[in-house]
């Protein structure tokens, strides 16, 4: 872990941290956490990762989204990378010291975070991610980080339903990083034109086995 970030000024990190703490969600502007070069590298690598057509989430929530899995986090097990070297290289990029430091500073963390699960979503017209709670997949998930990888789509808004305030609607641009607490329900509205693509990862201070107790063995999103 380095002791400084080359991505964002201390002032910007503090601004994002306060917004995340107060509202539960923050949008980090394009270019701040991922350069154009990083995004191009992710795009190049992801083409080697197989894709699944997913209709159900971990809590039987309903979705319609194509998913590429990079790191899985199954109940009772340690997180583990899947789908070979392309996944490993993307995750290495996510875990680079400067990026991890910047994120931990936005989380307001005093200790290190691990990426417990990581996947990519492709959403052509008609796709959606139904309302769900990320913490239902793993009770130790604290923040999800969502990097927008496409710009030419309509619909696909990210809507957060905070417990004690009005819903918030986000329309992230290409390269934007949306950070949201895993304790608020949220959804991705249907895409109706173009194709929405995102890289999603879930961060936690817990590095051990997934402590979720499962009631059934359904494999989810
Ligand atoms: O693809 C996205 O924008 C995020 C979807 C989501 O909420 C999730 O994967 O938990
Ligand atoms: Fe989610």
Image (cartoon, grey):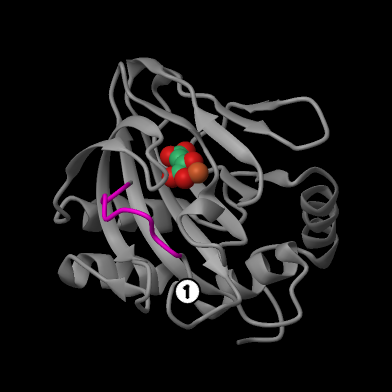
Residue 161 or residue 172, whichever sits in front: 161
Residue 184 in the figure: left or right of residue 120: right
- Residue 214 falls within the magenta-colored stretch: yes
The answer to whether residue 218 is above or below residue 152 is below
| x, y percent for residue 205 | 61, 76
The outermost residue toward the front is 215
Residue 139 or residue 30, whichever sits in front: 139
Residue depicted at 61% across the width and 52% down the height: 182
| x, y percent for residue 27 | 67, 42
Residue 114 in the figure: left or right of residue 193: right
Q: Which residues are magenta?
A: 213-220
Residue depicted at 56% across the width and 42% down the height: 176
The answer to whether residue 192 is above or below residue 199 is above
Q: Quadrant of the N terminus?
A: bottom right
Residue depicted at 71% across the width and 86% down the height: 3
Determine the image quadrant of residue 98: bottom right
Residue depicted at 45% across the width and 69% down the height: 116
Q: Which residue is mark 1?
A: 95
What secondary structure predominates along the stretch shown in magenta? Answer: loop
Residue 214 in the figure: left or right of residue 206: left
Residue 168 or residue 5, whichever sits in front: 168
The answer to whether residue 26 is above or below residue 46 is above
- Residue 67 falls within the magenta-colored stretch: no
């Amino acid at each position: 872990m380095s002791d400084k970030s080359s991505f964002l000024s201390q002032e910007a990190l503090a601004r994002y941290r306060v917004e995340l703490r107060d509202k539960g969600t923050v949008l980090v502007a394009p270019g701040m956490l991922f350069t154009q070069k990083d995004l191009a590298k992710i795009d190049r690598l992801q083409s080697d990762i197989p894709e699944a057509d997913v209709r159900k989430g971990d809590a039987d929530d309903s979705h319609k989204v194509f998913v590429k899995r990079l790191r899985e986090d199954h109940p009772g097990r340690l997180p583990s990378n899947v789908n070979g070297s392309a996944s490993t290289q993307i995750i290495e990029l996510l875990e680079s010291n400067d990026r991890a430091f910047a994120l931990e500073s936005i989380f307001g963390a005093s200790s290190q975070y691990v990426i417990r699960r990581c996947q990519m979503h492709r959403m052509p017209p008609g796709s959606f991610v139904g309302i769900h709670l990320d913490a239902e997949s793993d009770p130790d998930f604290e923040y999800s980080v969502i990097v927008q990888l496409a710009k030419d789509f309509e619909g696909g808004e990210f809507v957060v339903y905070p417990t004690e305030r009005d819903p918030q609607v986000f329309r992230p641009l290409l390269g934007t990083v949306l950070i949201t607490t895993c304790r608020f329900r949220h959804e991705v509205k249907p895409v109706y034109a173009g194709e929405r693509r995102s890289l999603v990862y879930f961060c936690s201070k817990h590095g051990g086995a997934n402590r979720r107790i499962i009631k059934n063995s359904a494999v989810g999103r």
